[in-house]
Image: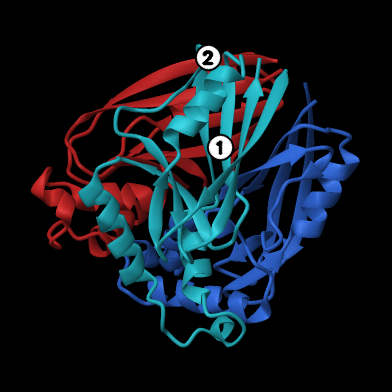
Chain colours: A red, B blue, C cyan
Amino acid sequence: MRTIFKEIRVSTKERVELIDMTRDVESIVERSSISEGLCLVQSLHSTAAIVVNEHESGLMQDIVKKVQMDFPKTAGWRHDLIDDNAYAHLATTYLGFSKCLAVRNGRLVRGTWQNIFLVELDGPRERTVLIEVLGK
Amino acid sequence: MRTIFKEIRVSTKERVELIDMTRDVESIVERSSISEGLCLVQSLHSTAAIVVNEHESGLMQDIVKKVQMDFPKTAGWRHDLIDDNAYAHLATTYLGFSKCLAVRNGRLVRGTWQNIFLVELDGPRERTVLIEVLGK
Amino acid sequence: MRTIFKEIRVSTKERVELIDMTRDVESIVERSSISEGLCLVQSLHSTAAIVVNEHESGLMQDIVKKVQMDFPKTAGWRHDLIDDNAYAHLATTYLGFSKCLAVRNGRLVRGTWQNIFLVELDGPRERTVLIEVLGK
């Protein structure tokens, strides 16, 4: 059994924004020489999530809009007395900070319309995403 | 360390529908001869999610109804200009496309009320779910 | 490849409540002597979820309030004809019953503001959370 760890640094530009990390993750898997196993994509933040869906610019805007509708910035949260980003913590709690994908035949397994996104929820910021490939 | 991969094909019948995959996943784990490890259940689609909850027919209808309330089909999404299923992409983004469970003593670990469901969100369609068992 | 399994028992006190399990999970990882791999945190229940976010008392109250807003207790669900907790099943379906984190250099990998919580959604109850550490 072998493991490979790589950290990807991302500079986000908007308050809420999707960053496509698919090519970076695929490249890490392919260079790992691990042929069968798992790939964990883990945000190291509590206001930035990881999701998987289609890379289509309209849909990416829809996801941003839906998150802003479901987690409005001003709603009288207690955490906003400390730091003005309760909505971003709540959205990350719902969307999830890490995702697992299969690795098979030396490649990341994903459907045709499955891309991996960092969801910035309290940008702009510098973010770190850990990619772990584990297998043989 | 060993890995086993199996693809399960599912023909869904409704627009939004839960398909119980528990027996198939359990059977794959038991036949894998892997006694300790992990089981990844990964939908290969961006409009079909994987969730875990109780198999009770009323609850399964409640989950469908809740998803339809939270992700209504007509809401003026940009992606609907390309393909009429933005709601299904949004619901999959929230519910998640893959889930991990433990494998212990040669069996899938799940609580009494934990069943594994494919959530069809844009049916009827032909779906593929990848089951990976990794361990020793 | 090695695996370690530990079950953590939690007695919850409120109907909806966050229980911080971070120290227990970290301790299990450190005592496992596994230096590189994955840690799976799996609730064995369909009305108790696992989430990762910041341990700040105001935010923890915000998460409870948000869940109660999004999954109100009385909404005419069919499952309530059998057991008065459909809202808790629905919330668990959305928030997720298991989460994966990386293990690196013998330690659980988490960001500064990432703590691991059991989310009780139908308490008070006795809950069991399975921690699996898999790696080398």
Chain label for disc 2 = C
Q: Is residue C37 left or right of residue A13?
A: right
Q: Label 1, on which residue?
A: A100
Question: Going 83% across and 33% down the picture, which residue do you hit?
Answer: B35
Nearer to me, A124 or B37: B37
Picture coordinates of residue B51 (x, y %)? 59, 58
Q: Label 2, on which residue?
A: C106
Q: Is residue C75 above or below residue C40?
A: below
Q: Is residue C132 above or below residue C61?
A: above
Nearer to me, C11 or C84: C11
Q: Is residue B131 left or right of residue C101?
A: right
Chain label for disc 1 = A
Label 1 is placed on what type of residue?
Cys
> Counting other residues with Cα less than 10 Å from the Cα at mark 1, is it few (<14), some (14-19), or many (20 or more)?
many
> Counting other residues with Cα less than 10 Å from the Cα at mark 2, is it few (<14), some (14-19), or many (20 or more)?
some
Q: Is residue A68 left or right of residue C77?
A: left
Q: Are labels 2 and 1 assigned to the same chain? A: no
Q: Is residue A119 visible?
A: no
Q: CA distance from mark 2 to mark 1?
A: 20 Å
Picture coordinates of residue C89 (x, y %)? 53, 68
Picture coordinates of residue C26 (x, y %)? 48, 26
Label 2 is placed on what type of residue?
Gly
Residue A32 placement: quadrant:
top right
Residue farthest to the left, as pictured: A81
Residue A61 placement: quadrant:
bottom left
Nearer to me, A80 or C127: C127
Picture coordinates of residue A5 (x, y %)? 50, 16
